[in-house]
Amino acid sequence: MSTGDVALFDRFARYYDLFMPGAQATHLTRGLELADRPVRRLVDVGGGTGRAAQTLAVEQRLVLDASRGMLEQATLPSVQGDAGRMPLSTGAVDAITIVDALHHIYEWDRLFEEAFRVLAPGGVIVVSDFDPTTVPGRVLAVGERLVGFDSRFVAPDELRNRLETAGFETHLLDGGFGYTVAGVASKREGT
C-alpha cells in the first residue's frame, strides 16, 4: 500500500464503517468452499476494520493491514503489517481474503507469492475488487484519484494470470464491476 493511502485510511478510519456498505459473504464463502482442506484459519489482508472477515464463519480470523487507524477500529484480532511480507509462518493459514483492497496494495506478484507461502497446501485466496475495464470501474478509479488515493486496479483476467503464475488454480466466481476471483494453492514440491 502506498504511504499516502495508509495516511488517508488512518485519517478516516473512525468513519469508514459508517460510509462503506457491509461486505457480502456470498461470493467469499463460495471461494472458501473451493479449498482442498477445511478452512479453520483465515487472514483478511488489507482487511481494515475487519468488516469482510466478520461475515465469514471461520474459527480463527486475523485482520492484517498497514493502517494502524483502521486496525484500531477492528473488533477481530489484528496485526499491522505489509501484505508482501506477512508476519506469518509458512503454511500457517487455510484461507486469505482480500476484499475491496487489492487496488491499494502494490507489488501484486510479491503479494501472491507471499500468499502462496503462508497458505497451507490446498488453501485458498479469495479476492474481491473492482474491474477498471467497466464504466463504473473507470469512474471509481478517477474518484479515488480525486480523493488522493494512489489506487491501481486490475481486471479479473489479469488477476487470474498473476495468481496462476504464483501457483494457484483460479476460478472466476463473479464478474462485472465488482468481481471475485479465487485461487487454490497447489501442493508444494515434496508434500
Image: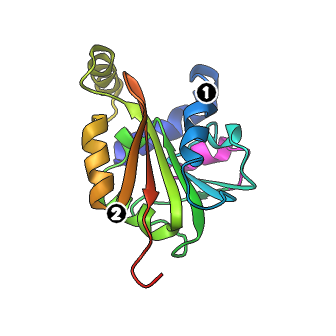
Q: Is residue 68 magenta?
A: yes
Q: Residue at x 42, y 75 (%)?
A: 188
Query: In the displayed structure, does residue 125 sit left or right of residue 168?
Result: right
Evaluate whether residue 66 shows in this view: no
Q: Is residue 121 above or below residue 164?
A: below
Q: Which residue is mark 1?
A: 15
Mark number, residue 170: none
Q: Residue at x 43, y 85 (%)?
A: 190
Q: Position of residue 91 (x, y in %)?
A: 54, 72
Q: Residues within 10 Å of mark 2 (few under 14, many from 20)?
A: some
Q: Is residue 150 magenta?
A: no
Q: Which residue is mark 2?
A: 167
Q: Relative to the observer, which residue lies in front, 102 or 36?
A: 36
Give whichever of discs 1 and 2 has the lower sequence position. Answer: 1
Evaluate whether residue 38 shows in this view: yes
Of circles 1 and 2, the one toward us is: 2
Bounds of the magenta segment: 65-77
Q: Position of residue 125 (x, y in %)?
A: 48, 52
Q: Residue at x 41, y 30 (%)?
A: 179
Tell me the amino acid under the disc marked 2.
Gly
